[in-house]
Amino acid sequence: MSMFRSAQNFRVDNSQFHSSQHVHNHNTQDNRIDGWKMLLQNVASNALHDSRARFDAPKCDEDTRVEVTKEIVDWIQDCEAPQRLLCMTGAAGAGKSALQQTIAGKCSDSNTLGSAFFFSAGDPTRNNLSRIVPTIACQLGLHNDALRDSVAKAVEEDPLIFERQIQVQMDSLVVAPFKRICASGELDPSTFPHAILIDGLDECSGEENQAELLSTIKHCFLNDSGTPFRIFIASRPEWAIRSALCSEPEGYLYQLAYHIPLSDKYDATADIRRYLWRKLQDIGRRSHDRRAQSPLWPTKEDIEKLVAAASGQFVYAATVVKYVSERRGSPLDRLRAIIDWTSEGGQRTRPLELLDILYRSILSTAKELYEAVDTNRGQDFLLLLRAHQMNSDSHVEGVQCNTRDFDEILSLEGGGHQVLFSDLHSLVFVRQKPTIAGVWEEMQFYHLSFSEFLDSEFRAQHLFVPETRVRQYVVESCLQKLLQQEAFLQDSNFARIINLLCRYSQDKTTYVDDPRLIDFTCNNGWGRIDERLLSHVGKSHLTYRMWSGLGRFTLDAIRRLNYDLHEYELADVVKSYFNKWKEGYKKDGFMENEYDEFSLST
């Protein structure tokens, strides 16, 4: 340094010397961070609509979902429309992701796609909120260099931004940079790609996280008119989005969002029929099986059976096509295996396994969430669900209860079925019908195959509940109700309980738990029946068919108390009531020989 004691500010190679004799290397950045590089490290590349990880993602066939696709595209293009958020909800397997993928492709082709994010429950990089804002910011930044620099600067100014709340991230990385560049004149918002697509909100783990994202969108985009973005969200109708969109009580997005209830508004039956014809015929033409190459395959009857089984949901049709297209088998034989398959047939094939995996996943999650609530502990979610399914599907001949009445029989709290179904809205809904007596409610399924799934141990596996167990549970619930306060046992309630008791106990394998039978007898349960039974003789409330079922149930109780439990005194109590009822009904005009089958063996 002594050589240059009097020299100032000169350069040797890449080093600059100052009079202070400090040396700085120009190849370093003074430890300055690279904001864009940090952003890229927090992006979920698998969530992009054209990601390699989502190769061959489902999308709509050219002539399917035409109406709903047009409705969505028109909404995206109409920048003057007042509602800047579109929420599309639909049942599991209704084709929401295929529609999102299709819309993303159309927006990309027309240069209106700002960003897309596809959630996936099985991918840790896109099943939570940690990467969604950086991914959106990155895609938007790639459309404009000045916006990209502004986003990078925001990261450099706050390197901890990725650890902050989602709303803070969205404001700092998307809204503020965009407004800043628009104000500087470096970006024209009227020509900027403005569609932001978010698919599968329900696959983001945690209801509170789903709600947080919706709240962030409201705060950052809907409450502020400073950005041109139109956000399209697709989701199953789970709690977070359902409560935000509901009308009563009014959700916080009810007035702000354009809502398309896909499963209710658009009947996909015709689309599914066209899809099956085209796909199966194409598989047949490429098959080595000459039978499948015939223009007569598949038959119209086969297609209509598949369309009926699909219940308007594309997931069933897609599962059929995937199974039939297996190149190692004959498509004709594999299609026949699906159409002829029954759970009782002893088959080893699993033609609907992909669909069953979806059902088991949704059902397991709903079970875990329901039984984790303090007030529900001790309640068997699967048993209650199966009981409601059997009631609504009229599994037991001659009896079906209003869903609310059935809640009361099962001793659920008022509206208990709503809590029970709260995490199953992608598979189940409650249909309401006005009647003279009031509103009739019944459980309905979006998928016929889901009800069949619940009926089949082969398909439901560890989630299966046998019908005999449900029958016993309903019978025991009826006995418990008969022991309750008098106010409940009005004429209609009494007749309903007796009807359920009779019908559900008709199966010879249905047995009341021994302690419950003894408890019912010791606590004057038969006397409770007797108090009201004779007043119903000859009235329409209690038909002979119901009495027949009650007679069988009573005789079975007598035999069990006598021969199995050796409770002879209790058996005599029940026998005395049975003989009294028998004589009363004889006097009311029933044929005497109708009672021969009820004669007691001594």
Image (tube, rainbow, N blue to C red):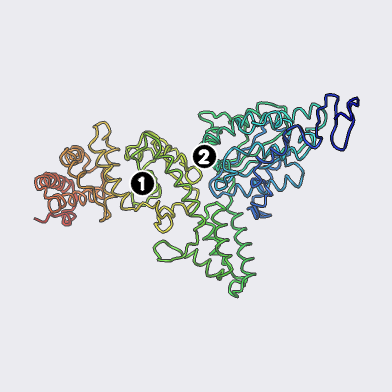
Image-quadrant location for residue 284? bottom right
Please indicate whether residue 378 sits to the left or right of residue 297 in the image: left
Relative placement, left or right, of 190 versus 486 is right
Label ID, residue 239: none
Amino acid identity at mark 1:
Leu
The reply to whether discs 2 and 1 touch (Cβ–Cβ < 8 Å) is no
Can residue 440 be seen here?
A: no
Secondary structure found at label 1: helix
Residue 402 horizontal side relative to residue 41, left or right: left
The residue lying toward the viewer, choosing from 398 and 572, is 572
Question: Of callouts 2 and 1, which one flags the residue occurring earlier in the amino acid sequence?
Answer: 2
- Horizontal and vertical percent position of residue 460: 42, 54
Image coordinates for residue 266, horizontal then vertical, percent: 59, 46
Q: Position of residue 179 (x, y in %)?
A: 75, 28
Question: In terms of image quadrants, where is residue 136?
Answer: top right
How would you rate the neighbour count of disc 2 (Cα within 10 Å): few for under 14, some for 14-19, many for 20 or more? Answer: many
Q: What element does badge 2 sit on?
A: loop
- The alpha-carbon separation of the residues under discs 2 and 1 comes to 22 Å
> Could you say where residue 327 lies in the image, as x and y percent from the top left?
59, 68
- Kind of residue indicated by mark 2: Glu
Q: Nearer the viewer, residue 133 or 596?
A: 133
Residue 383: which disc?
1
Q: Nearer the viewer, residue 70 or 188?
A: 188
**Image quadrant occupied by the C terminus:** bottom left
Query: In the drawing, what numbered circle is on residue 238?
Result: 2
